[in-house]
Image (cartoon, rainbow, N blue to C red):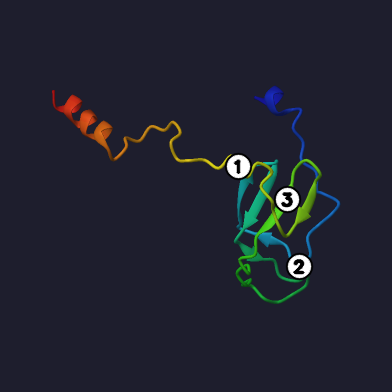
């Protein structure tokens, strides 16, 4: 396992977004090698006496993994290739395929 991940290394990007840091957030990778960061709680100021932090404003932040830079906006690099929902998945559909799977289970 160590050899598998030995070439992977994370470093803190030099460019940081404005505002306070956020923890407890979610993230998702988008087309174009961009990570969308959302939600979470803001960190308190250093030396602050507050034990509870305010929830994040809900603003989305975008981190370009290729350029290691932050942005407040995102443009899909492949806008014409929006998923149609007809891709492969394990769940049966609501149509005749679902009925057929029930028949097979009864036989």
Which residue is denoted by mark 1 in the rendering?
80
Q: Is residue 73 left or right of residue 91?
A: right
The residue shown at (28%, 40%) is 94
Local secondary structure at mark 1: loop
- 48 is higher (above) or lower (below) than 31: below
Q: Is residue 82 left or right of residue 72?
A: left
Residue that protrudes farthest toward the right in the picture: 14
Nearer the camera: disc 1 or disc 2: 1
* Tag 2 residue: 19
SS at circle 3: strand
Comparing 5 with 89, the one in front is: 89
Q: Give the mark nearer the N terminus: 1 vs 2.
A: 2
Decide: few, some or many residues near mark 2? Use Cα within 10 Å; few <14, some 14-19, many ≥20.
few
Q: Which mark is residue 63?
A: 3
At mark 2, the secondary structure is loop
Place of residue 13 in the rendered image (x, y in percent of width and height, measured from the top left): 82, 49
From the top left corner, tell me how far across and down residue 80 is, in percent.
60, 42
The disc, 2 or 3, on the residue closer to the chain's N-terminal end is 2
| Disc 1 from disc 3: Cα separation | 22 Å
Structural crowding at the residue carrying mark 1, measured as other residues with C-alpha within 10 Å and reported as few (<14), some (14–19) or many (≥20): few
CA separation in Å, label 2 and label 3: 15 Å
């Amino acid at each position: 396992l160590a050899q598998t991940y030995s070439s992977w290394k994370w470093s803190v990007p030099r460019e940081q977004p404005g505002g306070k840091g956020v923890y407890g957030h979610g993230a998702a990778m988008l087309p174009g090698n961009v990570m969308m960061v959302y939600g979470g709680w803001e960190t308190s100021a250093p030396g602050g006496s507050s034990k509870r932090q305010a929830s994040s404003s809900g603003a989305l932040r975008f981190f370009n993994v290729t350029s290691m830079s932050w942005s407040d906006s995102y443009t899909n690099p492949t806008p014409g290739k929006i998923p149609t929902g007809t891709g492969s998945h394990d769940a049966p559909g609501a149509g005749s395929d679902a009925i057929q799977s029930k028949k097979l289970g009864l036989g």
